[in-house]
Amino acid sequence: MLRDVQTRFGGRSANYLIAVAWPLTHMGVLLIIYSLAGRAAPIGQSAPLFFATGLVPFVLFNYPSRQMMMALMVNAPLLNFPIVTTTDVLLSRAVLETVTGFAVVLIFAAIMYGLGVDIMPRYPETAVTALGATLFLSISVGIVNSVIQIFVRVWMIIYILVMILTYLASGIIFVPEYLPERARNVLTWNPLLQVVEWFRSAYYEGYGQRTLDKQYVLVTAAVLLAAGLTAERFTRRHASFA
């Protein structure tokens, strides 16, 4: 983990703060844009709170899943040691991204509270489990991405483009329940929309009753994790990190 931190941020552990600053800046810029646009919240009284409850799960999914993708490529020299396996590299990156993710959420919550936004959820246990499920899904997708990245070097670019489209379809700036039934039923297959709904249900009473499926999120994450680890095992001896 320590080597991972130093490798990613120019050989200095202190530069790890960049990993926290980037997602915070991402959320801050988007909130400023929404505020300047004068967009009202489609539900609740606080527009910053509504948009924040959509941005937090999205960023908590987006950044770890992308950083997990590069774990094997960046730490390839470690694999020259027989005792180190690709599973070790993925596990250390997963732990690092989990710690980073929760640090980002806590700092963002503190900033929002300092700005006068009541960020405390109505159901704290629901908020925590939603964030945990988001990280579980993110790491699972990241492991699958890391295997694909070995063989498809342009996968990072493709994935970023996919995430841009996913952002627009994840219920971050709208309430899925207000959409026509046909459109709503299609969007509910998006697991990222599900974690946004899950997190928002901790803040708004009765939110997501027609769209939220927690079991779907957990099953999807578990299947992706199993698929990613299985693919990593079968491709371990044939992968090229050059």
Image (tube, grey):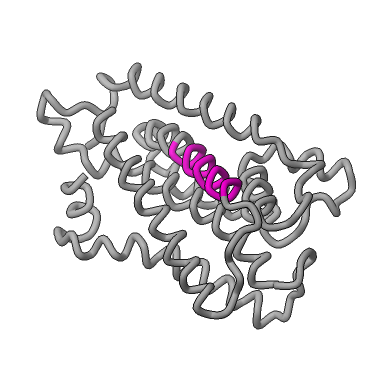
- Residue 220 as seen in the image, left or right of residue 171: left
Image location (x, y in percent) of residue 56: 55, 58
Quadrant of the rendered image containing residue 203:
bottom right
**Outermost residue, top side:** 234
**Res. 127 visible in picture:** yes
Of 131 and 230, nearer the camera is 131
Whether residue 52 is situated above or below residue 68 in the rendered picture? below
Q: Quadrant of the C terminus?
A: top left
Q: Position of residue 165 (x, y in %)?
A: 63, 52
Q: Main secondary structure of the magenta part?
A: helix
Q: Position of residue 133 (x, y in %)?
A: 53, 40
Residue 79 is drawn in which quadrant?
top left
Is 127 magenta? The answer is yes
Q: Name the residue at 31% across, 65% down.
A: 18
* Residue depicted at x 58% and y 63%: 120
Pick whichever, 109 or 229, lies toward us. 109
Q: Which residues are magenta?
A: 125-139
Question: Which percent across, then down, holds residue 163?
Answer: 56, 50
Residue 149 in the image: above or below residue 171: above
Nearer to the camera, 85 or 108: 108
**Residue at 64% in and 30% down:** 215
Q: Is residue 126 above or below residue 189?
A: below
55 lies left or right of 146:
right
Residue 166 is at least partly visible in this image: no
Residue at 81% in and 44% down? 184
Foreground residue among 163 and 20: 20
In magenta segment, residue 195: no
